[in-house]
Amino acid sequence: MHPPPPAADAMDFSQNSLFGYMEDLQELTIIERPVRRSLKTPEEIERLTVDEDLSDIERAVYLLSAGQDIQGTSVIANLPFLVRQNPAETLRRVLPKVREVLHVAGVEMQLTAAVSFRTILQEESVSIHTYAHSFLQVILLHLEHRDAGVSNAWLETLLSVIEVLPKETLKHEILNPLVSKAQLSQTVQSRLVSCKILGKMTNKFDAHTIKREILPLVKSLCQDVEYEVRSCMCRQLENIAQGIGTELTKSVVLPELIELSRDEGSSVRLAAFETLVNLLDVFDTDDRSQTILPLVKSFCEKSFKADESILISLSFHLGKLCHGLYGIFTPDQHLRFLEFYKKLCTLGLQQENGHNEDQIPPQILEQEKKYISVRKNCAYNFPAMIVFVDPKNFHMELYSTFFCLCHDPEVPVRYTIAICFYEVSKLLNSGVYLIHKELITLLQDESLEVLDALIDHLPEILELMSTGGESSVQENKLSSLPDLIPALTAAEQRAAASLKWRTHEKLLQKYACLPHIISSDQIYYRFLQRMFTIVMTNNVLPVQKAASRTLCIFLRYNRKQEQRHEVIQKLIEQLGQGKSYWNRLRFLDTCEFIIEIFSKSFFCKYFFLPAIELTHDPVANVRMKLCYLLPKVKSTLKIPADKHLLQQLEMCVRKLLCQEKDKDVLAIVKRTVLELDRMEMSMDAFQKKFYEKDLLDQEKEREELLLMEMEQLEKEKQQSDGRPMSEKSFEKKRRDTKTPTTLPKSIPISVPGPSGTSTPSTSKEIKKSKLIRSQSFNNQAFHAKYGNLDKCASKSSTVGYTPSVSGLGKTSVVSLTDDSFRTRNACSAPTTFSPSASLPGTSRGTGNSVDPKSSGSKETPPRKATLKSRKSNP
């Protein structure tokens, strides 16, 4: 085979080709020259140059007088600063020039002036009297600018001014001229502006002035010959009704709305309908049943024959309408409105076909977009319709509609129903089991937007699912929903595979509720390892931190000591002693979460030494992060019980001060030392200043002890009965005993040492009572704030230290009192684990040269942790 011939357009670096490239470059230079010449000539630059010695006021006056438009616009944009700096001189010298320039200014300068005038008002740089005297006439002068955008900008500024102007100024400067501006002889633009000003001013005057001077103008504009004016005035009737009170509203506003609802213009009828819906609370029952209900009924019947935009508005206001008219419907009218809503929920779905969008005419595509908006609005109003039909009738009346909305082919519709899912669940209460399948459907939705909307209230939804149902027994109903766990895991994997890391982070945060929803074993085998993998391998820091915190919560509520021991061992060995410095940084994040979630004794027992041994880490960033964490680490110590740990901490800090070579780390160490010196230590006995924190920590210790007792008592129960206790019988016993979910203060905490002996319990009834309490603790309802877990941990053992002459410091012996803290397979994993042999951890920063991303030499034999089983006396 011969090699392929070179391509014809391959790059050739011969001399001839290089000369060709140079000629091309010269041609490009020639093309570029006219562009450079067209920028600014020296004469133009000379005209744009301003003397630097001029003051701000003088420069502004000069630029407004002799400068170009762009310079004048810059001065007007800077007007609020000039008013703040020197209000008197700005109003005396600069503002007159601004008035002159605005007479002939373009659109950009006009828009800039409107914004600057509004900014000056909002900043209150001058008094209201001064502002009205200096700026109000300029604003009124440009209200009727020929450009609609400019006119609206000045109108927005005027409406802001009306809110703060005194009544007399409003009457003389705005209301009196408005009488002539609202006449038919004026332009349409002038009459539209008058409508909006009237709507804003009504609540500024007394009832007599409104009735004599404002309402005649309102009536006149409601009967204007132009439909734009009638529609604009109709939309202001809501503001006018709020200003004139109920009586005048019924006698003046309601007749106008009735007449406008029959207008020939569709936009006017739509404005009248929306205003009527917003004013339903103002009218009494007679007005609603005799006047408004027939109008609404007629409007709904004609809506399908009218423009689709009317359907969009009707579908959006239907929930508010049904709520406002609730109680005055006859059974037949109630049924008609419900059928009308169901019809809107499926609008456009019957017309779907298999054609490509390119083959569909543009007008049909536009119509389909409007139908999607209608169905989206129906999804938004679904909770209101549940109230309308009564939640007891949901299955018969609305379930099929809810099913259609959850399976709608358009993402905006499913997104909206996902947002409303929590409200629907709350309304259904004991009937929430009816929408189990729809929850799974939305969790498995192909669109991450739908998933993101659903998980905002996922913990609350799952809590309702787990505690609701037909039965009054508060047993876990999720056992009847086998698809939940696969749906949750698949949702997390889809979020992880996408680029939307914020959705992934939020989902991991919400998974913290799972210990209160599903069993500990299900979490361990289906979720916990996944959290650990994310912490180890994900590239997004917020996602890693969310997974780390959720992992700690899973560990906190794990009911098997063997599994807890395995997770702790993995955290220390694969994160704290990991080869990658990034993993060791994440270990410090995990330590921070453990300090927050668990008791102080738990952290001191398992994580204190692995954390402070990172003072020897070869990577400066790890040592720096540890320095920031040291105050929290010290706050977990209690004196005098943890005096030996305090000595270890002080030794590590002293070594950092003496041996640290990185100047940034050293600076942080010095600041941390000062902070540590200022800290007051917590004592074993309760202190007044730390009372709340100590009480919370004691609750955490009790709950942790309760979890350990739970497993032991369950094992004894299984051995004695030969079978595990069923959930139903357990719930029955828990309800019968009504034992509190936390341990009483009289129950001792087992602590190794002379003072740690526990009082034996010889009665079987007491053991059963403990078992019931421990299981009820795992099933108790959790707080609505899932991010901040309520109470967390317990103290069952301490860490003893044996002085050692060999090595760099003291050798620690970690006494693990939990009898099942060993790996499931004795052949594959050791039953003991320890940080390492130097000080309290590995000798990572000393001795041989180390790779920056490695955790140091592994040749030093690890210290062994003796496992002591905690036996309860019979």
Image (cartoon, rainbow, N blue to C red):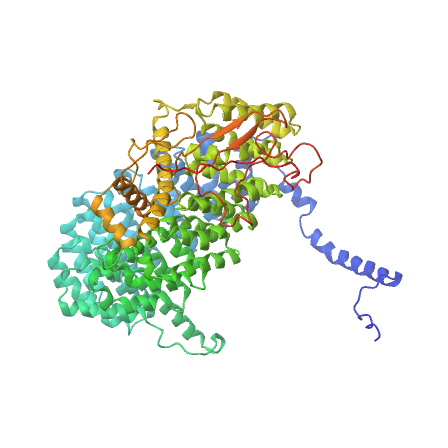
The one of 811 and 527 positioned closer to us in this rendering: 811
Tell me the quarter of the image containing the C terminus.
Answer: top left
**Residue 159 horizontal/vertical position (percent):** 34, 46
Q: Is residue 78 visible?
A: no
- Compared to 773, does 404 lie above or below? below
Q: Quadrant of residue 182?
A: bottom left
Q: Residue at the location (40% across, 60% down)?
A: 443
**Residue 280 horizontal/vertical position (percent):** 19, 56
Residue closest to the far left:
286
Q: Residue at the location (56% across, 46% down)?
A: 70
From the viewer's perspective, is 360 left or right of 49? left
From the viewer's perspective, is 20 left or right of 456? right
**Residue 301 horizontal/vertical position (percent):** 23, 72
- Compared to 408, does 545 lie above or below? above
Q: Residue at the location (38% across, 72% down)?
A: 367
Q: Is residue 402 visible?
A: yes
- Compared to 349, does 462 lie above or below? above
From the viewer's perspective, is 689 left or right of 805? left
**Residue 18 horizontal/vertical position (percent):** 85, 60
